[in-house]
Amino acid sequence: MDVSKIKLRSLVLHSIPKAKAAEKEAGATGLTISDLAAALDATRRLFLEDKIKTALDSRARPVIEDPEAKSAAAAAIRAYLQAKPDDQDLVATSQALARLLYNEQPGISPAGVVLVADLEFAGSTALLLAKLDREVGMRAFTTNEHGQVQINIDYLTDLFVTAGTKVFKIAVFAAADIKNDQLVGNIVDEQAGGHEVARFFLHLLGCNFSQRPQEQTQHFFHGAEGFINSSRVPDAETKARYSVALLSAMQSQSKEINVRKFAAEHLDKNDRDAFVAAMTERGITTGVIKKDTELIKTRLKRVQIETDRDVFIMAPPDRLEDGTITVKTADGSEKSVVEVTDTVRRVTPHS
């Protein structure tokens, strides 16, 4: 998703304790439910907006509502997004979601804060549900008594968002993305680590991932390949270099791929924004993708160079990296020079 199009408009916060199973059964929730939206000045708004964007941009995965799940949380979110602006009640919706999240989360979940926010996303109303863990920290402050300066510290136990906070469970859904009365959105769980998402959070929202890792990987590969072979990369030498980088990324030991990371590590600076934009246009997530090359494994064994006059050269990607095959743009010409430096073993007809 294009997080640059997110604008935070209002939010409500609720406090959730660490609840043991016995306490839940007894009904002693200890929830602190807000009756009013949080006050937001420009500084607070921008700080929280940045944290939300950073979290979504790093590991967001697309999800779609499963109608068979009959999720009360999904129904509440959908009702809010489909209501007329005058009928939208963020406080009431957030209260319902906070109680549902508390009841769904396992007893080992830490105490934290539930944040429910109304967003503007690409011109559409969107709703965000986030679980943030509490943090502790120290605050320095200065006192001055009898002409002497003393710096003391406060021990703060009610922090929930700091500059270093990375522990987020976030789900965001936009009204414009609802299809066939089903929510379509993105979800991220920094606490679970990597590409994983806590089962309870998916279950709470009644959602499934909209693409399997194999399909997401294939989508990424075809999208990157399409960009490389488009007119946006007119130079043959650059095309060859980018193609080798793509194959190397697919064959590497890394278990994840990411549009922005690939662009930053392998593309020239002036091509990076165009690449990200092209991939976004194809509907490819800019978050982390769990890499699974099952559907493209046969494509990763050879790189093929094809010319306008039907000349084909196929070789392992390593041969372009070690200099056995070089691709250069001819001086003063739109044509390219492809050189193969090796010992000729045989020449045979090929149908």
Image (cartoon, helix red, strand yellow):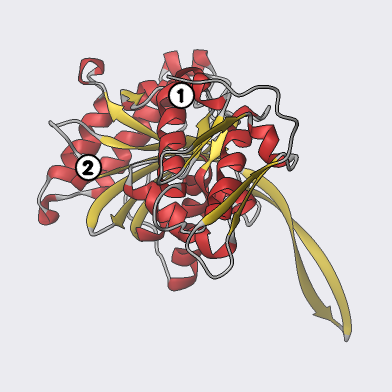
Q: Position of residue 200 (x, y in %)?
A: 44, 21
Q: Amino acid at mark 2?
A: Asp
State how far apart marks 2 and 1 are (Cα): 22 Å
Q: Which residue is mark 1?
A: 213
| Residue at 22% across, 54% down | 124
Q: Position of residue 272 (x, y in %)?
A: 52, 58
Q: Which residue is mark 2?
A: 177
The numbered mark, 2 or 1, whose residue comes first in the sequence reads 2
Q: Secondary structure at mark 1?
A: helix
Q: Amino acid at mark 1?
A: Pro
Q: Position of residue 47 (x, y in %)?
A: 51, 63
Q: Secondary structure at mark 2?
A: helix
164 vs 6, left or right, is right
| Residue at 39% across, 51% down | 230
Q: Residues within 10 Å of mark 1 (few under 14, many from 20)?
A: some
For the C terminus, the quadrant is: top left
In the foreground, 250 or 130: 250
Asked if disc 2 and disc 1 are in contact, CB closer than 8 Å, the reply is no
**Is any atom of residue 333 visible in this view?**
yes
- The answer to whether residue 263 is above or below residue 47 is above
Q: Residues within 10 Å of mark 2 (few under 14, many from 20)?
A: some
Q: How many marks?
A: 2
Q: Position of residue 23 (x, y in %)?
A: 49, 18
- The answer to whether residue 323 is above or below residue 25 is below
Q: Which mark is residue 315?
A: none
In the foreground, 259 or 55: 259
230 vs 301, left or right, is left
| Residue at 19% across, 38% down | 178
In the foreground, 174 or 99: 174
| Residue at 37% across, 20% down | 203
